[in-house]
Structures are given as C-alpha cells and as structure tokens.
C-alpha cells in the first residue's frame, strides 16, 4: 500500500478504524428488511466491478503497464466496505478514505469497492500546483496554479465524457508542472509528477476517468479494492429496484424530500436554501426528481422530471418530453426502459443512499459527506422504515510546503501578539520572537522598570513627590516598546511582502495526494 499516511499532519477516523467491524455487524441488522435485495445486488455489483477493474488492467497492459487487480472477496458473508469520490487528482483528505478501505481489505477483514462519481461535471486531470518565480530567488510561491491534461476543461462536461490531450501535449504540460515543483525545491514531488505524466501520456487514448483510476492504482492507492463508475452501477437491475423501493409514489417522494430538507436546515440553523441541496422544483404537473439525465451523444446533463397520471409514471425533461417509454408502472421500469443514448443517474443524497442502503455494509465518507449525510439518514428512515446504517468518516491533511507554512504561521502569530508583546515582552522570551541581544536589552529595561516601580511605591508610602520616578517609568516603558517594535518590524517584514495568493498557496491542503506518496 501507499506510504502517504505514515506521518500525516492531521488525521481523523470517526469512529476509529478498529471499530468498523462492530459497525458492520450492526448495519447488517439495521438493513435486514432489505436483505434479499441486498444479497442479489452484492452479487450483481461484484461481477460488474470485477469486470471493470479487469478492463482497466487490460487497457494498461496494452501500453506495457502492469496493473495488478485483486478479486472481490464477497462469498461466505464477507463484509463489504465502500468509498467513493469524483475521479480526480484529489487531495490527501480524500485519499485517506481509500487508504483506510485498502487497509481494511489488506487485513483480511472483507472486501472493498470504490465508486467513481463520473456523472458530476469537471476536469478529472486538473493539477493544483504551487507556482514560483525563478527570477525572485525566493522559496515563497507566488500563487497556486492549475494545469490540465484534458482536451477541454469545459465545466459543463461530466467527468466520464472528458478526453485526454495527445501524448506530446500531456508531456509538455507535465514538464511545466515538474519545472514549477523543482523551482520550489520540491524535488521528490517533481519526480512523482514526472512519473505520473509518463503514465498519463502512455494512456492518452483512454477516457480521462480510466486513466486517472489507473494512475491512482499505480501510485499504490486503492490497490486492494475494485473500481466501478456510478454510470455503470446505474445499469444494474438491483439499482433500479432499490430506487423503486425508495421513491415509490414520485409525488409523495417529492413532497417528503423537500419536507426533510426544510427540517434539516431548521435544525442546523442553515439559511442558504441550496444547502445541503436545493429543494426539488415543480412546474404544473411536472415534478423534479434528484436524478441527472445524461445525453450520450451531446455529453450534457440536465435535471430529471416526472409526470404521474392514471396511465402510469413517465420520466421526462423540463419540457415534459419523456425519456424512453411513457406510462411505466413504477420507477424501476422507467430506468430499465431508457433508450441507449440516454443515461439517468442519482444526484445529491441519492448517491450515498444507494451505496449505504443497498450495496455495502459500511460507507466511508469524508468530513463534508459525513455532515450532509445526516439528511440521507432521515431520508432512508422515512422512505424505507429502517434505522439508517452507520457510516465512517475519515480524512487526513498533508501540507506540501511544510517549512514555508510553519514560518508563515509563526509570523502571523507574531503579528497577532504584537500589542501584547510591547507591554509584556519578557513573556515571549525563548520563543524565537527576539534575538539574544534584544532579549538582553529588554531584560535590562524590565529590571530597571521594576526597580523604579518599587522606588515609586516607597516614595508614595512616605507621602513624598514621585513625579521624577513616574517620568522615569514612562521613559523606560517607551524605550522598551520602541525596542520591541524595531525588533518585530524586521521580523515581520517578510509577512508584509506576502500577498493573499502566496498565503493561499502556502496554506493549501488541496495539492494532489500523489505528490506526497511514493509509487510502490
């Protein structure tokens, strides 16, 4: 497995990893009302995931890349843990979900499957990289820049529709990435970027999502799991049957979904009506459902609507034009009867509702998903009359520019404490705030002030004038304050020269995980 998380800066697994098997046992009990469908779904998905993973292996082999793929161990009641994300060059926080799922399988605790959410929109191959100006001879980045291996970065394209640039173009872009990392003294990260560039260039004939998944495996992340795209998961009959159980009467579902959203926002004090998801809309007899329709020919997606009348249920676009057959008896028949050039996939809470309610024994979320899936809990409980299954939340932070980050945080702490340091400088001795010479001078002034204060007290106790001593104390305090300000002015000068773009680049935890962990 990958060595990415040997020493993470921040680490979270909630509940702890060693409690996952207990959660799985409880989840199986909670989901027992769906047991027969879940057993069939598990078999159906495992076959599809194994087939897709072998397809990735074969595609890599065509260009001379050896990509090991493990079989999915699902027989004999083995536990199945799933995780998933958009198939991108994600940061370490997301990578940690895959790392723990890998670890679960490697320890012989069960099987693992990762779902690639290829139906969301974006660029799978976008790199976020700290950029440096070589002419400045500085270790501080000027900004965080974005680079891409994709032919088009049109945000209107689903991930699964994005294609890669040519071999030559990928290598040219990769060299720009490597040059920036080397300019910042990030030699190890540059070597990893160079290796990734070579793999992407050799895989340029594949869809971008497949290349990203292969490269992720080659860098030792997710090697113990099988992959399956959400788009393929939605071709399985058991997925259709699950949504039939979850949705039932579409109009009733529409009303319940919006009611639960309103309750969730009120409970959490959320005023933004698109958080965590927007309410489903209604136009006359058209009711929006939380699905996307993807046109295979145009590679564009749009919201799915439905109509319900005495003749049955129809899924349609916003104008009322149906997808596939009209007047189906239920949602499962609607999904099964789509034309070959049309794809319908879940969005928002329905994605994890599918994973958690149907396919897996435990789903591993990031921190963001762990928050919004409280709504999914309520939806599953309301629509399926089950106690919602537990989920696990995992994340970890790594910082590419560690030394610069530590220095920036130190300088910002100095700036924050500037006022306090001018009045109580000795409290900050031996913290690195002052030089040894400045500390000696401040110590002498502090001792002189203490003597003067004691003299002031004695004069006042005898009823004598203390005006001269009072002036002396003020003079000492002013000299001390000026000394602190002069000392810190020089120390804080670098902070004044760093703009917001540099600060953002230094503090970012969003850089691709593969820059941190070595390929095995």
Image: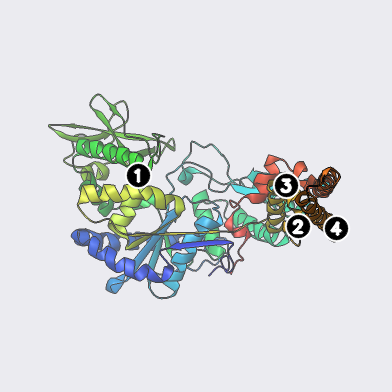
Q: How is the image coloured?
A: rainbow
State the separation of the CA atoms marked 4 and 1.
Answer: 73 Å
Task: Answer whether labels 3 and 4 touch (C-beta < 8 Å).
Answer: no
Between circles 2 and 4, the one closer to the viewer is 4
Q: Earlier in the sequence, mark 2 or mark 3?
A: 3
Residue ranking furthest to the top: 284
Locate residue 227, reporting x and y percent. 43, 59
Hey, which quadrant is residue 518 in on the image? Answer: bottom right
State the separation of the CA atoms marked 3 and 1.
Answer: 55 Å
Question: Where is mark 4, residue-wise?
Answer: 444
Q: Nearer the viewer, residue 196 or 377?
A: 377
Question: Where is mark 3, residue-wise?
Answer: 418
Q: Nearer the viewer, residue 18 or 197?
A: 18
Q: Earlier in the sequence, mark 2 or mark 1?
A: 1
State the separation of the CA atoms marked 3 and 4.
Answer: 20 Å
Provide the secondary structure element on which disc 1 rests.
strand
Task: Answer whether labels 2 and 1 touch (C-beta < 8 Å).
Answer: no
Question: Where is mark 2, residue-wise?
Answer: 426
Provide the secondary structure element on which disc 4 rests.
helix
Q: How many marks?
A: 4
Question: Where is mark 1, residue-wise?
Answer: 345
């Amino acid at each position: 497995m990958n060595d990415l998380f040997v020493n993470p800066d921040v680490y979270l697994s909630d509940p702890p990893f060693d409690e996952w098997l207990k959660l799985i046992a409880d989840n199986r009990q909670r989901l027992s009302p769906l047991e027969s469908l879940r057993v069939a779904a598990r078999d159906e998905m495992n076959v599809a995931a194994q087939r897709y993973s072998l397809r990735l292996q074969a595609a890599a082999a065509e260009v001379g890349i050896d990509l090991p793929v493990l079989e999915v161990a699902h027989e004999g009641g083995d536990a199945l843990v799933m995780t998933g994300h958009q198939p991108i060059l994600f940061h370490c926080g997301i990578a940690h979900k895959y790392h723990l799922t890998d670890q679960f399988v490697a320890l012989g605790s069960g099987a693992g499957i990762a779902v690639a959410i290829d139906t969301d929109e974006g660029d799978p191959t976008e790199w976020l990289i700290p950029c440096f100006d070589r002419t400045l001879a500085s270790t501080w980045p000027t900004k965080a820049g974005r680079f891409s291996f994709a032919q088009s970065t049109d945000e209107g394209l689903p991930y699964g529709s994005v294609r890669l640039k040519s071999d030559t173009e990928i290598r040219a872009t990769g060299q720009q990435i490597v040059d920036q990392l080397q300019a910042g003294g990030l030699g190890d990260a540059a070597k990893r970027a160079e290796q990734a560039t070579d793999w992407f260039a050799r895989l340029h004939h594949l869809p971008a999502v497949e290349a990203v998944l292969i490269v992720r495996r080659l860098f030792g992340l997710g090697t113990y799991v099988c992959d399956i795209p959400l788009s393929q998961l939605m071709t399985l009959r058991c997925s259709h049957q699950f949504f039939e159980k979850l949705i039932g009467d579409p109009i009733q579902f529409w009303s319940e979904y919006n009611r639960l959203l309103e309750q969730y926002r009120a409970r959490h004090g959320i005023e933004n009506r698109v958080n965590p998801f927007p309410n489903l809309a209604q136009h006359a007899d058209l009711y929006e459902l939380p699905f996307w329709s993807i046109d295979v020919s145009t590679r564009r997606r749009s919201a799915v609507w439905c109509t319900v009348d005495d003749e049955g249920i129809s899924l349609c676009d916003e104008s009322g034009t149906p997808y596939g057959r009209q007047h189906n008896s239920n949602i499962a028949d609607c999904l099964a009867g789509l034309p070959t050039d049309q794809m319908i996939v879940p969005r928002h809470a329905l994605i994890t509702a599918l994973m958690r309610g149907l396919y897996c024994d435990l789903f591993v979320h990031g921190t963001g998903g762990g928050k919004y899936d409280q709504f999914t809990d309520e939806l599953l409980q309301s629509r399926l009359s089950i106690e919602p299954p537990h989920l696990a939340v995992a994340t970890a932070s790594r910082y590419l520019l560690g030394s610069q980050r530590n220095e920036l945080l130190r300088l910002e702490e100095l700036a924050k404490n500037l006022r306090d340091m001018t009045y109580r400088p000795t409290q900050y001795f031996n913290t690195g705030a002052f030089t040894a010479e400045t500390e000696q001078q401040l110590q002498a002034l502090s001792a002189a002030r203490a003597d003067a204060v004691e003299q002031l007290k004695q004069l006042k106790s005898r009823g004598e004038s203390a005006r001269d001593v009072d002036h002396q104390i003020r003079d000492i305090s002013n000299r001390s304050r000026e000394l602190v300000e002069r000392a810190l002015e020089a120390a804080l000068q670098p902070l004044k020269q760093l703009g917001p773009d540099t600060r953002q680049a230094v503090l970012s935890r969003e850089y691709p995980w593969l820059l941190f962990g070595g390929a095995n």
